[in-house]
Amino acid sequence: VESYRLPQGLWHMSPRYQAKKHPDQPQDARSQVTLSLTIEFATSEVEAAGKGIAKFGVCLFKNYRAPELAFGSTGYSCAIDVWSVGCVIAETFLGEPLFFSESSLDHLVSIISVLGTPTKEDLIAMNPQIKESPIRLPNLHPRKWSKILPRADPLLIDLLSKLLVYNPINRLEPFTAMAHPYFEELKTCKING
């Protein structure tokens, strides 16, 4: 149930949901409300300045930090929180962080050891300002999710493989994550009470 609540919460904070809930409110006002939220999930601080420009502070929860932040991205998108949701869901299953690290560099190495080395296209998608990695990255192939989570339901593996990808555009959006077949049983069960 908790795993379902994470993307559901993100959906309710997203600009698309706010547009449906408040269609007569100007877009700038909706964006300002959404961006004025204090988000401590993936970063310690998000300061929204008028037009949706975000500045990131020091990461409190390195284990949930999206890779684009490690590559110097200063823009905020819901995809950053989607990454964090994937990390939390994986941790819930594993009983420990999927990407455990002591430092930012360790964190990046931990991600690469699971997802493999990001392609040039991935790097540009994570941060359009960089044309190549600022550091030399190890050349690793992605590990199979079934090896990382050997006892996991194949639907959980499918969900995580769509939440935890380098390219932020390719990550599931919160509403799409809520509709994933992994949560199907939850959507059809009746809660007594």
Image: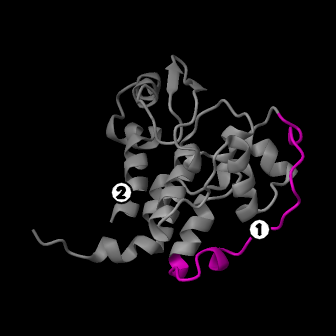
Whether residue 188 is in magenta: the answer is no
Which mark, by number, is residue 142? 1
**Residue visible at 32% across and 71% down?**
187
Q: Which residue is mark 2?
A: 5
Whether residue 146 is in magenta: the answer is yes
Quarter of the N terminus within the rendering: bottom left
Which of the pair 35/68 is nearer the observer?
68
Inspect the image, locate mark 2, and give the three-letter code of the amino acid beneath it. Answer: Arg
Question: Gap between marks 2 and 1, in whole Å?
Answer: 29 Å
**Residue visible at 86% across and 42% down?**
133
Question: Hey, which residue is sitting farthest front in the picture?
Answer: 102
- The image shows residue 33 at horizontal and vertical percentages of 39, 26
- The image shows residue 131 at horizontal and vertical percentages of 88, 38
**Residue visible at 52% across and 77% down?**
155
- The image shows residue 115 at horizontal and vertical percentages of 73, 62
Inspect the image, locate mark 1, and give the three-letter code of the amino acid beneath it. Answer: Pro
Question: Hey, which residue is sitting farthest left in the picture?
Answer: 193
Instruction: Give the magenta range.
Output: 130-155
**Count of numbered tags:** 2
